[in-house]
Image: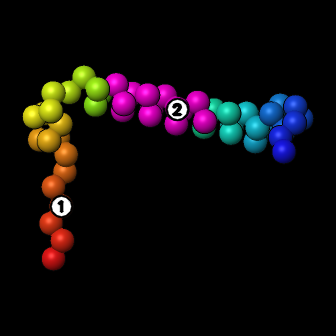
Amino acid sequence: MFDRSFFVSKLGVAALASIAAMSALNIFALTQQIDMTPGAAIVAAPLVELA
């Protein structure tokens, strides 16, 4: 589907940068959740009440 010519184009480089940024954000979010105590995780969770 994607070959070398795609990844050397501007769109391909932007796609790789986007994938790297999303991966870094997910890793950061997971490490923040792993370090939390169960009580802090409950307090940090947003509470939404549906009408």
Name the colour scheme. rainbow
Secondary element at image label 2: helix
Residue 41, how many percent across, how many down?
A: 18, 36
Q: Nearer the viewer, residue 48 or 10?
A: 48
Q: Name the residue located 87 percent from the left edge and 31 percent from the top edge.
A: 4
In magenta stretch: residue 29: yes
Is the C-beta separation of discs 1 and 2 under 8 Å? no
Q: Is residue 44 left or right of residue 22?
A: left
How many C-alpha atoms fall within 10 Å of the one at disc 2: few (<14), some, or many (≥20)? few
Q: Which image quarter holds the N terminus?
A: top right
In magenta stretch: residue 39: no
Q: Nearer the viewer, residue 50 or 18?
A: 50
Q: Which image quarter holds the C terminus?
A: bottom left
Secondary element at image label 1: loop
Residue furthest bottom in the image: 51
Q: Which residue is mark 1?
A: 48
Query: Residue flagged by tag 2: what amino acid is it?
Result: Ser
The image quadrant that residue 3 belongs to is: top right
Q: Name the residue located 68 percent from the left edge and 33 percent from the top edge.
A: 16
The image quadrant that residue 17 belongs to is: top right
Q: Name the residue located 36 percent from the left edge and 30 percent from the top edge.
A: 30
Residue 31, how many percent across, how many down?
A: 34, 25
Q: Disc 1 and disc 2: Cα gap in Å?
A: 28 Å
Q: Which residue is mark 2?
A: 23
Q: Give the extent of the magenta segment.
A: 19-31
Mark 1 vs mark 2: which is more N-terminal? Answer: 2
Please identify the dominant SS of the magenta region: helix
Query: Residue flagged by tag 1: what amino acid is it?
Result: Val
